[in-house]
Image (spheres, rainbow, N blue to C red):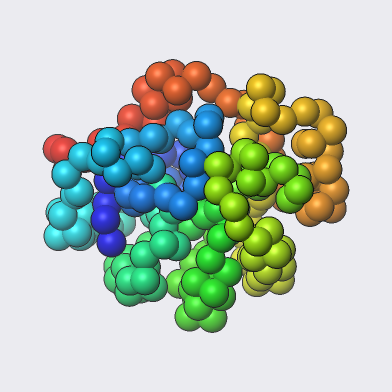
Amino acid sequence: MKIGGLLKFTLIDFPGRPAAVIFTQGCNFRCRYCHNPELVYPHMFSQPVAEEEIDAFLKRRQGTLEGIVVSGGEPTLFDDLPQFLAKIKSMGYAVKLDTNGTRPEMIKELLDKKLVDFIAMDLKAPLDKYSSITGVEFNPAVLRQSMDLIRNAGIGYEFRTTYDKEVLTDADIEAISQSVDGKCYRVQECLPVAKEKAALKVLHDDL
């Protein structure tokens, strides 16, 4: 795992649970409105946080925090994600995963091993517009696989879209909502990069 930051406390990122957020480095998308470019573009990466430092923080917060959110970047790009989440679960934390849904095989493994308690999947655009929004070419069928896995997993989940009105329309939002039958779907405002980064307070020191 390459860990790019830690948000030590949040009441809004894991529904119903006080939590911390661990941010991984690296992403397979290049969305123009990305609010964490320092976790996406390699030339902007800071020195990764040592996993041992994260372990020490999690041990100190046992009994205080209830959940850990693993976000990014895109956490499912890391083949050792199951081992990382198993370690978090062994400390008594519930786990929420934030993902773009491009690795359904990883999502399936995590679900089969009962390593996640909640999944939030970003839906960037209607499937026919995905490449223009994400900046990469890929088969959108993989997203349908992830969506089906998440909806049928029997755990808490949420689909969400960042509504950048420079690249999406109201009709696009309606199409995305219809693709998930309007269930567990949330639209979030696209904030200016500087403002959003300030709100997130992604930290990689003073652990």
Q: Position of residue 137 (x, y in %)?
A: 59, 52
Q: Which residue is drawn at the image coordinates 41% and 62% (left, top)?
A: 77
Numbered circles on residues, count: 0
Vertical relation: 83 (above or below) 67: below
In the image, taking residue 2 as reference, residue 23 lies left or right, namely: right
Vertical relation: 86 (above or below) 10: below
Front residue of this view, candidates 1 and 117: 1
In the image, taking residue 93 as reference, residue 155 lies left or right, namely: right
On the rendered image, what quadrant is the C terminus found in?
Answer: top left
Residue 155 lies in what quarter of the image?
bottom right
Q: Report the residue that reaches farthest toward the front.
A: 137
Residue 119 lies in what quarter of the image?
bottom right
Q: Position of residue 197 (x, y in %)?
A: 39, 26
Vertical relation: 17 (above or below) 115: above
On the rendered image, what quadrant is the N terminus found in?
Answer: bottom left
Q: Which residue is drawn at the image coordinates 16% and 38% (left, top)?
A: 205
Q: Which residue is drawn at the image coordinates 69% and 23% (left, top)?
A: 165
In the image, taking residue 27 as reference, residue 15 lies left or right, namely: right
Q: Which residue is drawn at the image coordinates 37% and 22% (left, top)?
A: 198
Q: Position of residue 103 (x, y in %)?
A: 53, 66
Front residue of this view, candidates 7 and 1: 1
Q: Report the residue that reaches farthest toward the bottom.
A: 112
Front residue of this view, candidates 154 and 159: 159
Q: Position of residue 169 (x, y in %)?
A: 77, 28
Residue 120 visible at all: no
